[in-house]
Amino acid sequence: MISLTTTAPPISRKAHRLAVGALFFLLGLCFASWASRIPSVQQRMGISEAQLGLLLLALPIGQLLSLPLTGWLVAKEGSRKVVLWGVGLYATALLGLGWASSLYQLLPCLVLFGVGGNLTNISVNTQAVGVERLYKHKPIMASFHGLWSLAGFAAAAVGSFMIGHAITPGWHFVLIALFIMAGLAVSAGYTVREDTGVDPNQPIFVKPDKELLGLGAIAFCALICEGAMFDWSGVYFKKVIQADKAWVGAGYTAFMSTMALGRFGADWLAARLGAKRVIQLSGLLTATGLLIAVLLPTLVTAMLGFLLVGFGTSSVVPLVYSAAGRSKHMSAGMALASVSTIGFLGFLLGPPVIGLVAGATSLRVSFALIAFMGLCVSAVATRVRV
């Protein structure tokens, strides 16, 4: 008797990797598209710098408030379902940001954008942990994060084109959202369907164990450095290096370039040297680069320093997320949410601390403090099992 029952052929690990990599790229494109048009939105609404600064706090508030809920959702429903819904929410919120006509419309859209960004961040990293397991724990996490960084360059180029052709943020974001949804439709069928450690009875709050707290501390120190570079590199080149107007953004570009490049090489290094040693070297590179920029504040030396900082910060968070996803204490989603919460506090605290220290002393002193946080990455990594 011939059976009419058929089973779907298994999906190759390469297909899983391509699909999850595509999701990382789409998420990076979504976030960076918004970042590229912030000046346009500010100008259109007539928002002052002070108002903009307060307004932009809505995004990290949305991220922070949704962190514990996201871990619980991933543990209960699985990362595949959360990432598919999360990408749709993220793209929809982007449309809201483009078409908002008042602060009262923009504010809730930013909170929603933060929630969507966090839902996708935790769930897509859980997907990446699942793909990494298919490769027998061969390090591949950093390459996923490299695609996110690469999307930032693509979004900046598209944003410049849109601005140059006087295309409004609303229509710009419509095109981006359509591209994201098309990419999601193609990738969805190849995502990892089952996470390790999914527990429908997982409580919403779980106390992290000592190992996860250590990984969170590494992420905290590393993201303080990242946050400072994102927000203050241009100011440093303008006020300390006193670079010409055309070169004010050179430090940020140098940092972002090596950060993206370093992520594509971090997996290769981790496979040969071990994740712990790579994180230790990364912390030393970050500290060295910042100290070069502080002690030798010229255009050439500062650019060299920022190049080193980019390499230094590139691999820490991906490798820490990879280690957290292998936790035996809780599910991958909850473990990632725990480490991400601690690390995200560093990302939020870094820029304002730089400002406070700079106001009391100088920018060079505040960047020296960030160099110390780079050393802390190496120090904590020696005491944590990665």
Image (spheres, grey):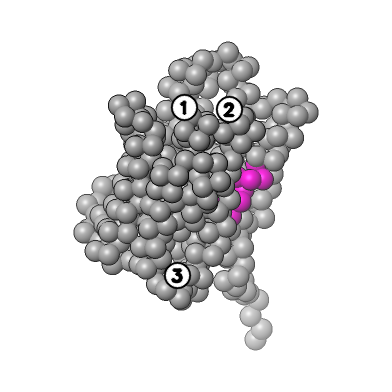
Q: Which residue is under mark 2?
A: 38
Q: Which residue is under mark 3?
A: 270
Of 142 and 126, which appears nearest the observer? 142
Across and down, in percent, residue 312 comes to 45, 56
From the image, which quarter does the N terminus lie in?
A: bottom right
Of 293 and 138, which appears nearest the observer? 293
Of 26 and 151, which appears nearest the observer? 151
Label at residue 56: 1
What is the distance, in whole Å, between disc 1 and disc 3 at their CAs? 36 Å
Mark before the other along the chain sequence, 1 or 2: 2
Do residues under tags 1 and 2 come within 8 Å of each other at their CB atoms? yes
| Local SS, label 2 | helix
Across and down, in percent, residue 44 comes to 63, 17
Residue, far bottom? 1
Question: What type is the residue that disc 3 sits on?
Answer: Ala
Question: What type is the residue that disc 2 sits on?
Answer: Ile
From the image, which quarter does the C terminus lie in?
A: bottom left
Across and down, in percent, residue 246 comes to 65, 33
Q: Is residue 119 left or right of residue 256?
A: left
Q: Tell me what residue is drawn at x 48 percent, y 70 percent.
A: 269
Q: Is residue 237 magenta?
A: no
Mark before the other along the chain sequence, 1 or 3: 1
Q: Nearer the viewer, mark 1 or mark 3?
A: 3
Of 227 and 213, which appears nearest the observer? 227
Which stretch is magenta? 147-155
The image quarter containing residue 380 is bottom left
Residue, far top? 46
| Local SS, label 3 | helix
- Crowding around mark 3 (Cα neighbors within 10 Å: few <14, some 14 to 19, many 20+) is many
Question: What type is the residue that disc 1 sits on?
Answer: Leu
Q: Is residue 189 visible?
A: yes
